[in-house]
Image: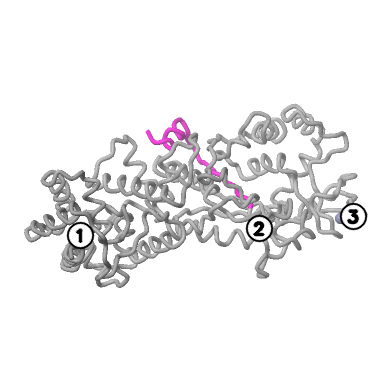
Amino acid sequence: MHWADAFLEGVDGDQVISTGISPSGPIHVGNMREILTGDIIYRASSLKKLKARFIYLCDDIDPLRKVYPFLDPGYSEHVGKPLYKIPSPDGNGTYADHYLSPFLGSLEKLHINVEVIRSSDLYATGKLYKTIKNVIEEREKIAKILEEVSGRSVGRDWYPYNPLCRKCGRINQASVVSFEDPYVHYECKCGHSGKSDIRKDQGKMPWRVEWPAKWHVLGVSIEPMGKDHGAAGGAYESGKRIVEEILGTSAPRILIYERIMLKGKGAMHSSSGIVVEAGEALKFMPEEAMRFFIVKNNPAKHLDFDPALGILYLIDDYEKYFNAYFGKDRVTDDDMQAVVKYSSLDSPVGPVDPSFRHLVTVVQIYSDETRLLRALKSSGSMIDSIDDNLRSRISKVRYWLSKYAPESVKFSILPSGTVVELSDNEIRILRRFLETSEDLDWEPQTIHDSIYSLSAQTGVDASDVFRTFYRVLIGKDRGPRLGFFLSGMDRKWALERLRECTQAARP
Ligand SMILES: [Zn+2]
């Protein structure tokens, strides 16, 4: 059973599935695990005929915590101010929107239909008012819960409310001195004293109280979360007690997921700059492959994201599942049907043709569409034209080749006339191939098979046979799968090139 279906076993009634990502920096592939896990559960709920609502809470009222490495040093004057009140790094609009907008664009591409709720709006519209009043009145009990769970002392004068200082604009510097519903009176470290109206966005609850307050107000019943929040002593443990003991509602059912690491660099965090932004990844990954990455793997498994060679294997795997769904390939996974359904943008549309890997080869041989199409058709693809969908995949392949592909998969065809020094054995191989090539079907599998029989006939190791072809065609010892590679090339040109090399090599 797929993990999302297993998670929903025994769940019934209306559901509110909640996710949250802070727009404090670039929203990256690591964050996709949060939103996609929510989306997959949401889809699984719909298939189970549960009435569900799927929300994404954008924590845009959170303060800027520090000047992150990707920010101009001038941002030091904004540290402590809410993200939706800070100017954008590009000068247009707000800081929060600057990071939120491209993320929303990625959600659209991935067909994630989520209701976006900004925390600042929850405060500004008074939706949190009664709950804020409640937690302020019960502050001593909440302080005790936080101390018991986290083991840290909270202090006698603590209020579960951080006022926004009207003078310095910071939301993490003022302390509450008293509460007279609906106002809190505060004193700020900047010297200003004033009052905040808790019915408006004039302050916020601290994270550990705000989270359960949102569960309560929005009726959240399911929430995926990173393991840091779910750990013993973490925010979920205190939140669960606050929502149950103080606010009188239940805590959501949780699904804890592991982190996504950027291969060779560590966990992805926007604060450290170790990230591939979600929008950037979609410039080279098919959307379904991004979904597949999260859908296929159990949330408890940590994942490595490798935009170089690893992505090619990930895409191979995704294509294999999709082709298996349509009976064109084989996978042994029992959950294959569910994986394909949840990875599809809408419903599964068909096998993948041509494969990403084949496109990687062919686009390096041909730049114009007509020859590209001819090469694809002659190498076994069933397409009749290059439509927008294929064009988009081709542009992803080209982008990947220009920015992330390792040298080992990149090549360029040597122009006619380039002399390559060949050994007697190599010349023998090529001549033998040319002799038999007259009757050869110019197709990947036949070419591949003919290379092996060439090896058997000449007694030359197959790897040396392959190397000979690569040396002559691209000047390297290794290259793309030879059957696909040759079949993607113009037959006449390729044979002429081989012949020329066998002649040039001998005086
Ligand atoms: Zn102040």
- 117 inside magenta stretch: no
Q: Nearer the viewer, mark 1 or mark 2?
A: 1
- Left or right: where 152 falls relative to 478: right
Identify the residue shown where x is 18% and y is 45%.
Answer: 460
Q: Mark 2 — residue? A: 70
Numbered marks: total: 3
Q: Secondary structure at mark 1?
A: helix
The disc label shown at residue 487, or none: 1
Nearer to the camera, 374 or 79: 374
Q: Amino acid at mark 1?
A: Ser
The CA distance from mark 1 to mark 3 is 72 Å
| Mark nearer the N terminus (1 vs 2) | 2
Q: Earlier in the sequence, mark 1 or mark 3?
A: 3
User: In this rendering, is residue 183 above or below 212?
Assistant: below
Within 10 Å of the Cα at label 2, are there few (<14), some (14-19), or many (20+) other Cα atoms?
few
Identity, as a three-letter code, of the amino acid under mark 2: Phe
Q: Which residues are magenta?
A: 1-22
Quarter of the view holding residue 286? bottom left
Residue 211's place in the image compared with 363, above or below, is above
Neighbour tally class for label 1: few under 14, some 14-19, many 20 plus, Cα within 10 Å: many
Residue 190's mark? 3
